[in-house]
Structure formats: structure tokens, C-alpha cells
């Protein structure tokens, strides 16, 4: 149980285009989903917290107009990288809170999406 | 967040040996800690967790030790196997109910 999927697993796009990454909880409902970015040989950095039906909360230094997050249902959150540039190339990972209530620490992670901007 | 260099701390062990991976955390408000394993090109996988009211917790082949006095966390892996080769991250909650902050990570390499 508690499986999180991401699509696509990897994507290559041209500079200036937008890319959408999907995060799905397959066998549970996730009120809260999290988006992380990970550069090579570095740790995971939280980008934003996504709550179903409300606006995402972005971490300091993360441009909300560049990284659009939509959490339209209890099983799906999307991250759209707008006007992508080579410096946005990274490994994007989502996670989901299984209980749907604050106080849960049970974050299950997706397999990640490798974005390469050329 | 804290800038991390391009070189992860590394630990190389022989198959069958015990491994100890260390982590220093910075937020004294943290009351919940988790160890994750990340294989190349994959998302983090939960290994074991511990709350601040404990100083030791054991799982299958793994033990987590917490020293709140010096803000130190360690992961011990018994009888390390080649399949344990991965990057290991500690994470702390900073006193938050839901947000995690990840440590720098340690690359564990198990030699057969």
C-alpha cells in the first residue's frame, strides 16, 4: 500500500517551453502533497506544499509563478515548470501524506522525474 | 536552505560488516526523525523513524540512535549487503507537523 507514482519518469524539453509533471497517490487519498527538487549529489530541497483544493505554499526562494502547482483532487497534484531554462534541469520528487491530517509524518515518495532542459 | 557541496560524504564497507551512518541536525525544535534510503534515479524509501522521547529504536537489521544533547542521529546497518548500497538521508521535522528537512546524505558503497 501507499504507492505514489510520477509521470513522466523523465522528460527533455527545449528552453522556453513548459513541462507538466504529475504526482498520483495510487491506493490512498492524499490531502497534502509535497514537491522537492534534487540536484546531482545533493539533498532533497522542499519546493512547496500542496493541499487539495487550496493554493500551494512555497518555500522561500521558490518562484510560484515559475513552478505552478495544482492539487485538484485527493489523488493528483501537478507541477508545471513554466518557461524552463537549463538551470531548471533537476530531479523532481513528490511525496504524499497518507493520513490526510496534520500531524502525520508518513510521507511516501514518488520515483521522481528527471527534467533536462536543452 | 544550506548549500551542499558536490561531493557527498561516503562510506565504503565490506559485505557482512556493520555500517554506521551519522547525521547532525540543527533544529532543536525537531521531535521526529526519519532515515531514508535513495537508490540511484529513484525516490527516497523509508527505513526507520524515531521520536525525540526515545534514544534508540530497532528495526530489521537497522538501528537508529538519537542523541539530543549533541543533536546527533545515527543509522546502524547490521551485516551490510550489496543491496544496501545507496545514498542515505536523515530528515527532521523541525517541530512541524508535516514538513521535513533533509540532511546532506551519505553514499554507502558495499564491496562484495
Image: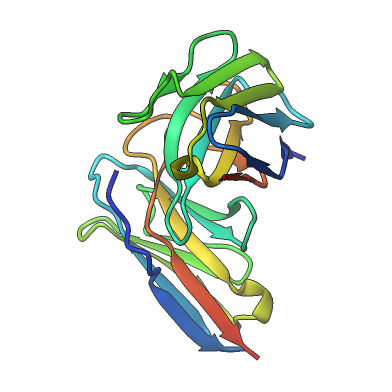
Relative vertical location of residue B42 with respect to residue B60 in this rendering, above or below:
above
Do we see residue A54 in this rendering?
yes
Give the image location of residue B99, x and y in percent.
42, 33
Q: Quadrant of residue A64?
A: top left
Give the image location of residue B92, x and y in percent.
38, 46
Q: In what quadrant of the picture does the C terminus of chain B appear?
A: bottom right
Q: In what quadrant of the picture does the N terminus of chain B appear?
A: top left
Do we see residue A102 in this rendering?
no
Q: Residue at x 58, y 41 (%)?
A: A93
Give the image location of residue B76, x and y in percent.
48, 72
The colour scheme of the drawn protein is rainbow
Relative vertical location of residue A102 with respect to residue A53 in this rendering, above or below:
below
Q: Is residue B40 left or right of residue A16?
A: right
Q: Is residue A118 left or right of residue B82?
A: left
Give the image location of residue B37, x and y in percent.
57, 60
Q: Residue at x 60, y 74 (%)?
A: B85
Between residues B68 and A116, which one lies in front from this camera angle?
A116
Relative vertical location of residue B84 with respect to residue A99 in this rendering, above or below:
below
Number of dots carrying numbers:
0
Q: Residue at x 37, y 54 (%)?
A: B103
Q: Residue at x 38, y 72 (%)?
A: B9
Between residues B83 and A104, which one lies in front from this camera angle?
B83
Amino acid at each position: 500500500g501507499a504507492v505514489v507514482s510520477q509521470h513522466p519518469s523523465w522528460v527533455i524539453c527545449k528552453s522556453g517551453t513548459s513541462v507538466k509533471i504529475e504526482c498520483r497517490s495510487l491506493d490512498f487519498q492524499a490531502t497534502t502533497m509535497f514537491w522537492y527538487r534534487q540536484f546531482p549529489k545533493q539533498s532533497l530541497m522542499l519546493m512547496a506544499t500542496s493541499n487539495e483544493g487550496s493554493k500551494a505554499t512555497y518555500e522561500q526562494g521558490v518562484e510560484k509563478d515559475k513552478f505552478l502547482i495544482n492539487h485538484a483532487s485527493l489523488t493528483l497534484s501537478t507541477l508545471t515548470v513554466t518557461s524552463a531554462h537549463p538551470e531548471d534541469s533537476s530531479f523532481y520528487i513528490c511525496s504524499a501524506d497518507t493520513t490526510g491530517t496534520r500531524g502525520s509524518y508518513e510521507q511516501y515518495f514518488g520515483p521522481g522525474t528527471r527534467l533536462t532542459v536543452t | 536552505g544550506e548549500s551542499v557541496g558536490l561531493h557527498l560524504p561516503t562510506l565504503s564497507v565490506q559485505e557482512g560488516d556493520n555500517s554506521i551512518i551519522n547525521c547532525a541536525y540543527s533544529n532543536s525544535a525537531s521531535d521526529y526523525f526519519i532515515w531514508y534510503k535513495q537508490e540511484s534515479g529513484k525516490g527516497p524509501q523509508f527505513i526507520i523513524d524515531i521520536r525525540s522521547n526515545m534514544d534508540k529504536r530497532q528495526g530489521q537489521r537497522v538501528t537508529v540512535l538519537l542523541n539530543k544533547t549533541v543533536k546527533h542521529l545515527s543509522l546502524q546497518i547490521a551485516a551490510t549487503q550489496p543491496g544496501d548500497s545507496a545514498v542515505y538521508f536523515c530528515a527532521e521535522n523541525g517541530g512541524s507537523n508535516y514538513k521535513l528537512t533533509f540532511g546532506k546524505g551519505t553514499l554507502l558503497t558495499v564491496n562484495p
